[in-house]
């Protein structure tokens, strides 16, 4: 990854904005949309700032002054000066999907956002709120955290009772939380790599890596392939997976 993707809570907090013109107006709208308070360059309590001048010299000077005070700075149309970038955003509050090209192409990020806008149901945020409200019911039904995570994964899987890409899933959360299935107990799937290039993974293989709870991989499997697995998946370098890999989905990963 070229950057650490994080979401920063700035609601009610000061965010410096210096600049002029339409670029500065767009940054102001973004700041206010996040619930922050746009302030001038001298505000002592601000921790991040946006710079949006039409000319490079003023942008460079303003960014240097803010960085000298320890602020993280975003400079419009100057990715080389940015400590952080502003992604294209799909807003399904409280669900936010951010798409970034690392400052390489705002047009590409915008195009991807528009595609995602068409795919993600308008009521996706309602599903998130319903799951949040059902936390106590889920804990009561699945007291073991591992089993609870399995149940949530199964419920939200493609075609599952809470499939997030199917509109109206929020309405079924209450019944699912009290009657839902905990999901599969154990499944081991072998993936045989054709090369060490992660771009050679099929969509199905990449999806399985993103879903698996544990990866049993040969020592020679490169880190770039393992990076396609979910961040919290257990990774074990071995010559062969155990006969009983454990509950949930496990991947036996090696070369063909």
Image (cartoon, rainbow, N blue to C red):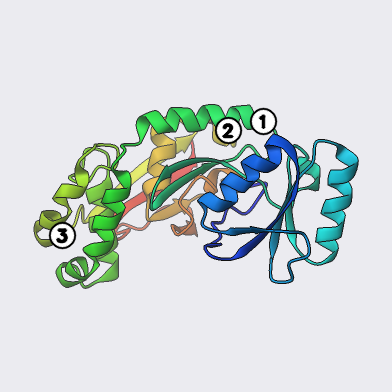
Give the residue number, with chain letter if any, for mark 3. Answer: 177
Q: Closer to the camera: disc 1 or disc 3?
A: 1
Distance between the Cα atoms at labels 2 and 3? Answer: 36 Å
Q: Residue at 63% x, 37% y: name it.
A: 101
**Callout 3: SS:** helix
In the image, 47: left or right of 42?
left
Q: In the picture shown, does residue 229 fall above or below 112? A: below
Distance between the Cα atoms at labels 1 and 2? Answer: 7 Å
The dot on residue 105 is 1
Residue 136 locus on image (x, y percent):
21, 71
**Callout 2: SS:** helix
Q: Label 2 crowding class (10 Å Cα cut-off): few <14, some 14-19, many 20+?
A: some
Dots 1 and 2: beta carbons under 8 Å?
yes
Total numbered labels placed on residues in the image = 3
Q: In the picture shown, does residue 189 fall above or below 181? A: above
**Callout 1: SS:** loop
Residue 192 locus on image (x, y percent):
45, 36
């Amino acid at each position: 990854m070229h950057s650490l993707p994080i979401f920063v809570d700035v609601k009610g907090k000061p965010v410096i904005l210096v600049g002029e013109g339409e670029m500065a107006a767009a940054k102001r709208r973004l700041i206010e949309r996040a619930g922050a308070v746009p302030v001038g360059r001298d505000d002592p309590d601000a921790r991040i700032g946006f710079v949006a001048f039409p000319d490079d010299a003023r942008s460079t000077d303003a960014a240097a002054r803010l960085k000298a005070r320890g602020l993280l700075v975003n400079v419009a149309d100057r990715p080389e000066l940015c400590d952080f970038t502003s992604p294209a955003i799909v807003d399904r509050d409280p669900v936010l999907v951010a798409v970034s090209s690392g400052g390489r192409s705002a047009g590409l990020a915008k195009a991807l956002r528009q595609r995602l806008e068409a795919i993600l149901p308008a009521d996706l945020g309602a599903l998130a709120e319903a799951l949040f409200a059902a936390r106590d019911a889920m804990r009561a039904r699945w007291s073991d955290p591992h089993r609870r995570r399995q149940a949530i994964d199964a419920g939200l899987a493609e075609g599952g009772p809470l499939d997030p890409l199917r509109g109206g899933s929020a309405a079924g959360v209450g019944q699912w939380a009290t009657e839902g299935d905990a999901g599969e107990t154990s499944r081991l799937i072998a993936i045989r790599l054709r090369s060490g290039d992660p771009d050679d993974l099929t969509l199905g293989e990449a999806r399985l890596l993103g879903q698996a709870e544990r990866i049993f991989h040969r020592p020679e499997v490169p880190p770039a392939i393992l990076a396609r697995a979910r961040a919290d998946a257990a990774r074990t370098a071995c010559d062969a997976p155990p006969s009983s890999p454990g509950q949930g989905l496990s991947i036996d990963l090696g070369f063909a």
